[in-house]
Amino acid sequence: MASDVNRSHIEELDFNGHVVMSALIAPERSVKFHGSLVAQLLLKDENLPMNDFVSDWSSTLLTTVSQASKADDISLTRVALSAFLLSLERCPGAQRVVMEKGLHLMRETAKRTMNHKSVQESLAKGLESLCSGDMRLSIEEGQKWSCILLPWVFRETSSDAIRSSAITILSRICEDYGPSSIPISQGWLAIMLSDILKSRKLSLKGSAQPRDKVKTQIDQANVLSGTQSVNQLASDVVNLAVNGDSFALEDFLTLEPFINTYKNLKKGNIPKVNALDSALATLKGIKAMTEICSDDLFSQKKIIDYGIIPLLRRFLLSDDYEKLSAIEAYDASRDMEANDHGDSSVVDARDPSSVRVPPTAHVRRHAARLLMVLSVHPKVKKMILEDKDWCNWLDECANGKICSDLKTQSYARATLLNIFCNDDDDDDDGDGNNGSKNHGCARYGETIFLINPGMSHWECSRKGRNNNNNNNNNNNNNNNNNNNNNNNNNNDSEGGLESPSLDVIFVHGLRGGPYKTWRLSEDKSSSKSGLVEKIDEEAGKHGTFWPGEWLSTDFPHALISFVLQTNLTQWSGSSLPLQEVSSMLLEKLIAARIGDRPVVFHGGIGCETDATSSKCRKQRQSCQKQCWCGMFDLITYHYFQLIFIII
């Protein structure tokens, strides 16, 4: 369209940019259009010196974009917007001017052009470039932009580029403003959960699965729980917003699912929301999301696209709710201090001792659980592996340095094992039946708890791990146990780590748990024998978690894991669907490569374990027959379990 020679002549003749500026501010539409086009072509020239007039062009171009979008002149909007983006890329001064004076014009243009994808994509790219350097959106601007950024994330018509830019900007806002951004992060979670619930309801409505099937009943219960969680999240988001600066979040509160709660809110009776209530709402939202998505690959991919990973990173690595609680305690102490000095302006002063600590450890536990479920996806692996701080956090948590909760430690271990497995298959078909695929290395789902604190399999390199997996796959085709052992030893020398010689699986009962079932009793009654009492005394107040403390010493090279039977407490007697439950359990075991080595089961629900092993042998799925050679069901009750442990 324009030769290098012509551009060079224009640059020489219009060295101060006044001619182009005259065209940009001309009242005639055609002159504006061609002036914007000339500016675009000149800004593409890398040899153009970046003089001060470029920032003046930028401001004028943004004004043209705003006016053209208001008049629904999309062709002029596009040309002027393209030139405007180039000015931002070429001139840091232009970026500063826009951040100070032009964000409202970009925001209004975005609202007017929601149905024009190319314009939206350019605006998203421009805003991301403004936020990617040393400059930051103010908290007020971040709140005002949230009503645009979140629809960019969740609209079906949004391109991947729009969604990616919006997620990056939202993450930056949450990172910059911590507890002040909680309404935005909670709103993000609430909209995400609401969207997944809609998809799940439609899926269940069109499903041909029998209503009395256990999986159907569980799915329906999860949808009901998720709906309640969305309502609680929406209520807390609205209450947090109106107790703070509701003006900046006014448009944000008109989004679903907040609008009804916001409209019905009585201005004279605004409920107070504290850090505890806010954290509890977030906790329930994460739990509901995990239950809905745990076995639904389609939903998992959806929430990954919606930005759940940076949101989970925020919940795991930040201390927003602790800081919010500290702010509340400080404000309460100031109120009490003012009251002591007779300041009548302080109404409803709070007692600092009444400020309760939010359950942040539980929030982190369930955020880690959801991360573990999603960590088998290649996109998630890449995001975590590229984040050094996150990898360090997971490593320290898995080793118990920063996480005292045993479940959180297990989730961190499983996540690390999943992300360092490099047998990714990007061609998942989305039907959620990937559990039966033959993967090169184990995939740990939410029902598997890894409790050997000394095993650091994630420290091995990707290459070494891949070599071990290939050798193990060859071993699985060989029915000779001696050959298996020899090959495993070779793997140890090549990869630098010794592979487990067997898998020990603990299966708890209907009213048990993956950790509490295997603790020594806290009851110190005198009816116990002296030896048992001595063991209890050594166990400490909370009891000894003996598989982790004892078996990890006796079997330092064994992979010791728990299998948690979820949703069993509502089943009993003849209503316990053994075949269906065993099938669900078997899928998890196969995905974790249980059966490639000898397996030892221990638990008080032998009928289900036996059903699982029988089903595995019949179907010959992934399990080697010699690894499931027999089963002993030794059941003890009450304090006699201690005697069984000693034996």
Image (cartoon, rainbow, N blue to C red):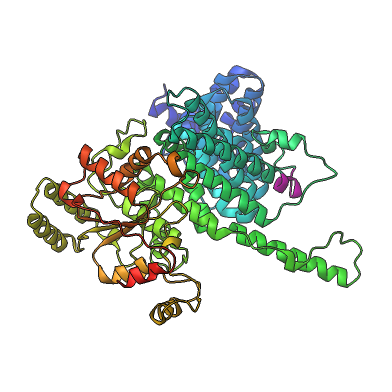
Q: Nearer the viewer, residue 267 or 542?
A: 542
Q: Nearer the viewer, residue 563 or 140?
A: 563
Q: Is residue 49 left or right of residue 531?
A: right
The prevailing secondary structure element of the residues shown in magenta is: helix
Q: Is residue 193 left or right of residue 239?
A: left
Q: Is residue 56 left or right of residue 562?
A: right
Can residue 84 be seen from the camera position used here?
no
Q: How many marks?
A: 0
Q: Is residue 431 above or below residue 189?
A: above
Q: Is residue 341 magenta?
A: no
Which residue is rendered at x = 60% and y = 46% of the image? Answer: 186
Which portion, as a residue range, is magenta? 239-246
Q: Nearer the viewer, residue 189 or 550?
A: 550
Residue 110: horizontal and vertical position, in percent? 60, 30
Which residue is rendered at x = 48% and y = 39% of the image? Answer: 292
Quarter of the rendering occupied by the C terminus: bottom left
Residue 161's image quarter?
top left
Q: Is residue 547 above or below residue 588?
A: below
Residue 64: horizontal and vertical position, in percent? 62, 28
Residue 548's image quarter?
bottom left
Q: Is residue 241 magenta?
A: yes
Q: Nearer the viewer, residue 609 or 55?
A: 609
Quarter of the rendering occupied by the N terminus: top left
Residue 9: horizontal and vertical position, in percent? 45, 30
Residue 509: horizontal and vertical position, in percent? 42, 53
Can residue 295 be seen from the camera position used here?
yes
Q: Is residue 424 above or below residue 454?
A: above
Q: Is residue 32 left or right of residue 387?
A: right
